[in-house]
Image (cartoon, rainbow, N blue to C red):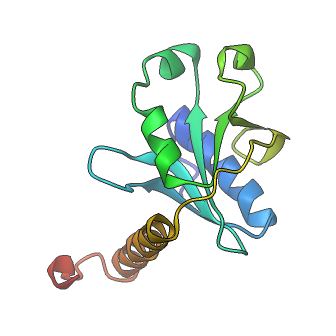
């Protein structure tokens, strides 16, 4: 990525969250689509197969305008909010996890209770994760790859 590239605040936060997750042994993937109509900011597959979803919020208005986040709960074992230090974290629901971060890293301030996925849902999410990651890698290596066969 060029130094001249300017990322949106949510993507900057997602980068820091991804770095934190990687340091914990998780494989993060940004902008994952578990099902049509939903797109999570970061999903991470853990070393034991656990699935975390992290929703990055860059401002109060970003949070208050989000009408879809509760739909993400059905696609993970643990759900987190990720915010930067200036975000008013007290407005976030307290039963979710909380990460504090910036473009360079993040830390977990609150670990949510686990809500393990059913086996069939876990398999579907894991396969979707693998497919989306593989397609992105194919595009990275060959931007003109014919993905119609996938």
99 and 124: which is toward the camera: 124
39 and 111: which is toward the camera: 111
Q: Is residue 5 visible?
A: no
Residue pictured at 43% horizontal, 39% vertical: 71
Q: Is residue 47 above or below residue 88?
A: below
Residue 52 sits in which quadrant?
bottom right
Q: Is residue 55 left or right of residue 132?
A: right
Q: Is residue 52 left or right of residue 11?
A: right
Residue pictured at 43% horizontal, 56% vertical: 32
Q: Is residue 62 above or below residue 37?
A: above
Task: Estimate the x, y position of residue 144 in percent, counting from the top left.
Answer: 22, 78
Q: Quadrant of the N terminus?
A: bottom right
Single out the residue that lies furthest toward the front. Answer: 118
Number of numbered labels in the structure image = 0
Task: Estimate the x, y position of residue 119 in percent, counting from the top left.
Answer: 52, 70
Residue pictured at 46% horizontal, 69% vertical: 129
Q: Is residue 18 left or right of residue 75?
A: right
Task: Estimate the x, y position of residue 64 in percent, counting from the top left.
Answer: 49, 15
Q: Quadrant of the C terminus?
A: bottom left
Task: Estimate the x, y position of residue 79 in percent, counting from the top left.
Answer: 63, 44
Residue 82 sits in which quadrant?
top right
Residue pictured at 69% horizontal, 68% vertical: 46
Q: Is residue 32 visible?
A: yes
């Amino acid at each position: 990525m060029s130094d001249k590239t300017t990322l949106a605040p949510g993507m900057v936060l997602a980068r820091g969250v991804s770095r934190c997750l990687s340091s914990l042994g998780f494989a993060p993937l940004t902008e994952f689509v578990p099902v049509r109509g939903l797109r999570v900011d970061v999903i991470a597959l853990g070393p034991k197969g656990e699935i975390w979803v992290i929703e990055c919020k860059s401002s109060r208005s970003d949070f208050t305008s989000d009408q879809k986040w509760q739909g993400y709960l059905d696609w993970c074992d643990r759900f987190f909010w990720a915010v930067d230090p200036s975000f008013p974290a007290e407005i976030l629901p307290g039963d979710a996890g909380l990460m504090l971060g910036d473009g360079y890293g993040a830390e977990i301030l609150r670990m949510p209770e686990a809500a393990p996925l059913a086996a069939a849902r876990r398999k579907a999410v894991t396969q979707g994760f693998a497919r989306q990651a593989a397609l992105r890698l194919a595009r990275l290596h060959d931007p003109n790859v014919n993905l119609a066969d996938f």
